[in-house]
Image: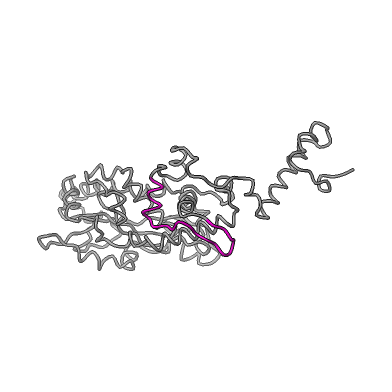
Amino acid sequence: MTSIKDDPITPDEFAVLRMSGYFSDEEIMALMLAKAIEKMENGSFHSHFPHFQLQDLTNEEHRHNFRFNKEDIYVLSTLLGLPDQYRSARNRIVWSGLDGLCVVLRRLAYPNRLGDLVPMFGHSVSELSEIFNCTLNDLHTMHSHRVQSITQPWVHHEEFAQAVFDKGAALKHIWGFIDGTVRHVCRPKIGQHELFSGHKQYHCVKYQHVMCPNGLVVHSFGPFHGRQHDSAMFRESGLENLLQTVIDSQGNQLALYGDGGYMNRPWLFTPFCCTQINTPERQAYNTMMSNSRVSVEWGFGKVCSLFSFVNYYTNQKVFLQPLGPYFTMAMIFTNLHTCLYGLEVSTFFGIYPPTIEEYLM
């Protein structure tokens, strides 16, 4: 008897053979699956899908897949300075900067495997990998500085400090909030001791962020080892030297506010610890500052909500992937999303973010 393995059958013949009773339904499905896997491994599976056309998707599909409206993606592609065309010598493929931006956004938006993106973009897995890595590397090279400086054109320290104070803060000179965030990572084969957090009880990396009252992250640094303390991150980030230069028009030092993991400085204030709360005034101080600081947690959580790829720990492989550029670009895209569509933080403090043109000056 002729077996499935020995008899090559095209998909067009399946219906005829099913009606003839030569193959069972299970055998037909097994053959279809085997052929699909073979084509995917040989790089030809993508040829069954049309190449990606951004204009063919609805606006709802754009928001779901890329986190931005259709017309805004065209604007972002131009403002981000992506070239009109990329050309790969290795895979001999050509793609536009717009297509590359869509691949990066789709990949970061959800923890997909590259094979899951083949039907949408019409490229093989190896081609998608090159498109994603090449475009993301270009974006990181051109724009990573946007979360490495606290003196950017859209940052108005005195205005920020006044907005924080008007919202009920106990101090008049707090212009932003600093915090560290922990991201669970896949357990590595080496370096487990450095990445393991005794507090969280899993392997992780840490990032440090400075959030402004307008809802934008102005400074982001990392990743650090999971064992590292917040104060060590602050010291290694070099942020202390930058903060010392931030003064108001009267010559007064302006400062950030952080949690108890940091040390008090003239440019960085923290709450009183439990052993120091011995007066009603100190308790009131902690309460007032906590109410302001808690609001910025909305902003810190937005990046993982919009771009959950950076929050899916089985995809976070420390020694196999550039986690720092992944998270940095997710943070910049989150800032751009806030510029376009707002955030609860800016509404709470009454300080609204700049336009995307102002942010990308």
Instruction: In this rendered view, identify the residue nearer to me: 172 or 147.
Output: 147
Instruction: In this rendered view, identify the residue nearer to me: 92 or 192.
Output: 92
| Quarter of the rendering occupied by the C terminus | bottom left
Q: Position of residue 284 (x, y in %)?
A: 18, 47
Please tell me which residue is depicted at 18% across the width and 53% down the height of the picture: 161
- Rendered image quadrant of residue 174: bottom left
Please tell me which residue is depicted at 53% across the width and 47% down the height of the picture: 52
Residue 76 shown in magenta: yes
19 left or right of 263 in image? right
49 left or right of 59 in image? right
Q: Position of residue 67 (x, y in %)?
A: 42, 44
Please tell me which residue is depicted at 19% across the width and 45% down the height of the picture: 167
Q: In the displayed orientation, state which residue is furthest to the front.
A: 84
Image: 217 above or below 340: below
Q: Position of residue 171 (x, y in %)?
A: 16, 53
Please give the range of residues in magenta. Answer: 72-94
